[in-house]
Image (cartoon, grey):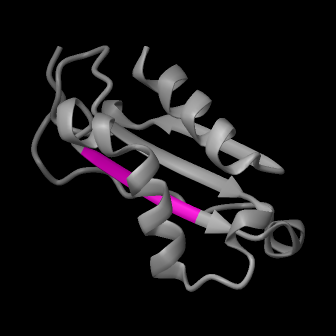
Amino acid sequence: MIQDVIEAKLTEAFRPDYLQVLNESYMHNVPKGSESHFKVVIASKFFEGKRLIEQHRAVNQVLAEELEECVHALSIHTYTPEQWSQQQEAPDSPMCFGGRLKD
């Protein structure tokens, strides 16, 4: 499963205090069971002192192969452990406006 690969790569690269990888493909106009749209919520010491764009680029770099081959969309929410301890919730993703879901 792509979700498992994403989780393993992010865990190895960032040793996160918190990691959640959600398959949000069901929210989009794709066949049932697809693994093409993901949301990543990650808190890691790696992100301390880095600008948001640097944090997101680091995640994209780790997942470059998946983004090139099979992942169509990736929503990234990065936090330092301190930020996460204060927030502990990422924003909800909106539903896709691409039409009805396929069966």
Question: Which residue sits furthest left?
Answer: 99
Q: Is residue 28 left or right of residue 13?
A: left
Which residue is at 26% across, 16% downward? 32
Please name whichever residue, 90 or 12, is drawn nearer the observer in this view of the structure. 12
- Name the spot of residue 63 as percent of width and height, x first: 40, 43
Which residue is at 53% across, 49% downward? 40
Which residue is at 73% across, 59% downward? 43
Quarter placement of the C terminus: top left
- Name the spot of residue 92 as percent of width and height, x first: 52, 58
Please name whichever residue, 47 or 32, is drawn nearer the observer in this view of the structure. 47
Quarter placement of the N terminus: top left
Magenta segment boundaries in residue numbering: 73-77
- Examine the image and state in which quarter residue 53 appears: bottom left
Which residue is at 83% across, 51% downward? 17
Q: Is residue 87 above or below residue 8?
A: below
Please name whichever residue, 72 or 49, is drawn nearer the observer in this view of the structure. 49
Q: Is residue 102 left or right of residue 34?
A: left
Q: Is residue 36 above or below residue 63?
A: above
